[in-house]
């Protein structure tokens, strides 16, 4: 990440801006279904995205990305108002007006994942990395045709639901999107358990959306357009549902989990982590 304080604009905080940007990565944090009050200054869902900002900046360093985070006016989606999506759309338009026609990847958690999917029809958007995204069954998907969607969800998430995410991915694929899911277990909606695994997955998948040639073989096959190397269905479910090891390799996936366990152990000893 770049040195110094983040640069804030009305709807976006710019966390990293290289001298000659080659891409834009826009992060969108979670929120609530309904809440009209503004986020607080120390907004925990927003702060939770900062490690993801660092992870994608590292993994995509060769692409020289601007890394920015949307600032919402309200904490909630708020029904047909779709406030988070409107703010994300405004932030994206303002950044591209300033930066030029860069390729864009949207990285969204929970409500931010829904907002990212909502605005992904923008012509500069290459795709979406969704982290435990909120995917209502009525969510439209036709605008996602041609986009790469890498959606990560834990099967035990009780706030948003993995099955809803896989359902949206299947509908998006039928509409022409290149979508895959990465199935986690043993984590939580806030992505605090196995945090290192979430960060590593976000970094690799974001780089792969920007540079498909950098994708691991199994992920590239899952995201291939129909008829271009797409895998054939297997007995264990849709071939586009992947494991963390498919994305990171067995060794790196295991190390990411172990680092997270070690970090939590230190936090418990220091008294500043969950039991």
Image: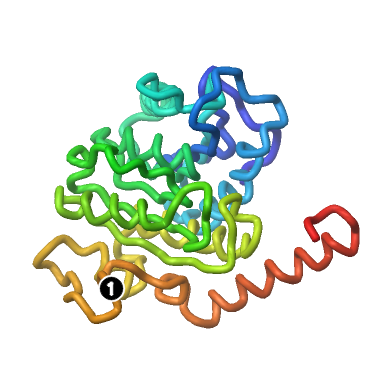
Q: Which quadrant of the structure image shows residue 62?
A: bottom left
Horizontal placement of 93 versus 240: left or right?
Answer: right
Horizontal placement of 197 versus 111: left or right?
Answer: right
Near mark 1 (Cα within 10 A), the count class, few <14, some 14-19 or many ≥20, is few
User: Residue 185 in the image: x percent, y percent?
Assistant: 52, 68
**Residue at the extreme left of the image, as rendered:** 227
User: Residue 161 in the image: x percent, y percent?
Assistant: 44, 52
180 lies above or below 147: below
User: Residue 220 in the image: x percent, y percent?
Assistant: 28, 68
- What residue is shown with label 1? 237
- Residue 156 vs residue 146, the one in the foreground: 156
User: Residue 142 in the image: x percent, y percent?
Assistant: 17, 40
- What residue appears at the point 47 percent right and 51 percent down from the top-left corner? 132
Residue 44 visible at all: yes
Numbered disc 1: secondary structure: loop
Horizontal placement of 6 versus 101: left or right?
Answer: right
Horizontal placement of 44 versus 168: left or right?
Answer: right
- What residue appears at the point 36 percent right and 47 percent down from the top-left corner? 128
44 lies above or below 231: above
- What residue appears at the point 31 percent right and 61 percent down from the top-left corner? 180
- Residue 21 vs residue 42, the one in the foreground: 42
- Residue 12 vs residue 16, the one in the foreground: 12
- What residue appears at the point 59 percent right and 57 percent down from the top-left corner? 188
Colour setting: rainbow
**Residue at the extreme front of the image, as rendered:** 158
Residue 94 visible at all: no
55 lies above or below 183: above
């Amino acid at each position: 990440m770049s040195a110094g304080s983040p640069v804030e604009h009305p709807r976006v905080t710019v966390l990293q801006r290289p001298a000659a940007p080659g891409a834009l990565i826009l992060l969108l944090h979670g929120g609530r279904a309904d809440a009209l009050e503004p986020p607080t200054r120390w907004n925990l869902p927003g702060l939770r995205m900062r490690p993801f900002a660092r992870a994608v900046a590292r993994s995509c360093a060769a692409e020289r990305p601007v890394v920015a985070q949307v600032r919402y006016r309200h904490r909630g989606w708020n029904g047909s108002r779709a406030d988070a999506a409107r703010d994300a759309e405004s932030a994206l338009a303002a950044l591209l007006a300033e930066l030029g026609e860069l390729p864009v990847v949207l990285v969204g958690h929970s409500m931010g994942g829904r907002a990212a999917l909502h605005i992904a029809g923008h012509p500069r958007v290459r795709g979406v990395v969704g982290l435990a995204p909120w995917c209502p069954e009525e969510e439209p998907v036709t605008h996602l045709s041609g986009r790469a969607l890498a959606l990560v969800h834990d099967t035990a998430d009780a706030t948003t639901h993995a099955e809803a995410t896989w359902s949206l991915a299947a509908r998006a694929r039928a509409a022409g999107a290149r979508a895959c899911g990465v199935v986690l277990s043993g984590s939580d909606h806030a992505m605090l358990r196995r945090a290192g695994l979430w960060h590593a997955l976000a970094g690799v998948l974001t780089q792969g959306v920007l540079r498909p040639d950098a994708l691991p073989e199994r992920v590239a096959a899952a995201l291939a357009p129909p008829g271009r190397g797409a895998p054939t269905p297997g007995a264990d479910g849709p071939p586009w549902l992947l494991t963390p090891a498919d994305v990171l390799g067995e060794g790196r996936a295991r190390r990411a989990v172990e680092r997270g366990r070690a970090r939590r152990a230190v936090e418990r000893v220091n008294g500043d982590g969950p039991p």
